[in-house]
Amino acid sequence: MMRKISLVFMGAVVGASAVIGITEGRHLLAGTAVAAGAETYRQLNLFGDVFERIRSDYVEQPDDAKLIEAAINGMLSSLDPHSSYMSPKNFRDMQVQTRGEFGGLGIEVTMEDQTLKVVSPIDDTPAHRAGVRAGDIILQLDGENVQGMTLNQAVDKMRGPVNSAITLTVKRDGATDPLEIKIVRDIIRIKSVRSRIEGDIGYVRITQFNEQTFEGLRDSIEKISREIGPDKLKGYVLDLRNNPGGLLDQAISVSDAFLEKGEVVSTRGRNAEETQRYNARPGDLTRGKPVIVLVNGGSASASEIVAGALQDHRRATILGSRSFGKGSVQTIIPLGANGAIRLTTARYYTPAGRSIQAKGIEPDIEVLQEAPAELKGKDDTKGEAGLKGHLKNPTDATEEKSGSQAYVPSDLKEDRALNTAYDLLRGVQINANFPPNPKASVPN
């Protein structure tokens, strides 16, 4: 099976629980320590006894650092699917992904039959300017053979400090001999927002929520409005399908872009005094134009915050299939040179006080996609409720729902949800849930 990775995403390979985690933009502050009881100290002594027994009697000499890391991982993973330990490298990769920029080349690559192949260079990046082409086979990186490397190892080698150089030896169709291409690394920005104009409608897709997301959304809305013209613009489609989430502050800013006032989201921790509420500021960037938000079973966390806020305020119609149902907040706690831990510290609630934990956002208009024969029965996500050890819904655990359709066809003509959204905005189709009734919105 061909595996594909983008240098934009730094080759970070993480499990579903890490990908969909929404990260709150703060670190934990030192607070009142909870005194450990005698039983706790007894258990810690037990851990020390087991650790020493392994070190002295295991059949092979164990690595102490790996033992400790495994113990930490076990402790965190026993809490819920989204709490975990990050090694120093994984922590750095996570920081790059959320920051949205890094020093690199700007090419998307894939490992196919143990060869590193260029899928495409990203426009206006060092690789594009140096003449790297789609279909090029990368044979060597600074004289070191790629064969035998994993995809992540190759990606790591192509990353590096800005203004540092690397030489790619590539095989190109039509060229007799391999080509050597010297590339100087530069800042590569992860483009989390893509947009286009579909006649009289603006289409905006957000693939993840990183530090560049709100800026990209604002620029896209301004460009669409300018090019179509406010009088001709019918409205916007905001596509959040298969968006795994990201930064909490960016989810708030994206929601705020469409709202004039009111609560966007609240987060509630173990103690009542930890509750925080985030409100919209005046200024709807779309100037009140109709908005349809597309979601599916792969829309999680930050995506669900945006969909929930716009749904509760009746600012947008939510269309597609039920979202993933991840309603918890993770705080990243650095551990100095030892990486960091990702710890679930709160649940989030929509403006109407709904917890979508293990339930998801139900669309106002359900539109299901016909999956190809080879994917039928395989195109649904497990959903949060299907993850072992997930947090229960605090309101009603009996209402938990698992699994929802997540297939999106590559052919736009076959995309039922997208074309339904276009038809609604143009008045070709009529539905009682579009446009939403503002009188039914949450009072704020």
Image (cartoon, helix red, strand yellow):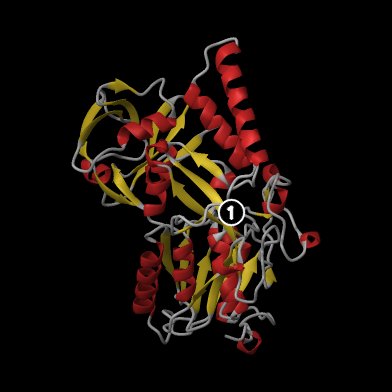
Quadrant in which the C terminus appears: bottom right
- Which residue type does callout 1 highlight? Pro
Q: Secondary structure at mark 1?
A: loop
- Bin the neighbour count of mark 1 within 10 Å (Cα to Cα): few under 14, some 14-19, many 20 and up: some
Residue at the right extreme of this rendering: 398
Vertical relation: 407 (above or below) 156: below
Residue 418 shows up from this direction: no
Question: Position of 37 compared to 188: left or right?
Answer: right
Residue 401 shows up from this direction: yes
Residue drawn at point x = 50 percent, y = 54 percent: 331
Can you give x and y, in whole percent of width and height, for residue 108 in the image? 38, 42
Residue at the bottom extreme of this rendering: 439
Q: Looking at the image, which is closer to me, 280 or 155?
A: 280
Which quarter of the figure has residue 219? bottom left
Kindly identify which residue carries mark 1.
409
Can you give x and y, in whole percent of width and height, for residue 181 in the image? 22, 33
Vertical relation: 278 (above or below) 357: below
Question: Position of 307 compared to 191: left or right?
Answer: right
Q: How many marks?
A: 1
Quadrant in which the N terminus appears: top right
Which quarter of the figure has residue 192? bottom left
Residue at the top extreme of this rendering: 59
Which quarter of the figure has residue 402? bottom right
Can you give x and y, in whole percent of width and height, for residue 8 in the image? 38, 46
Vertical relation: 368 (above or below) 421: above
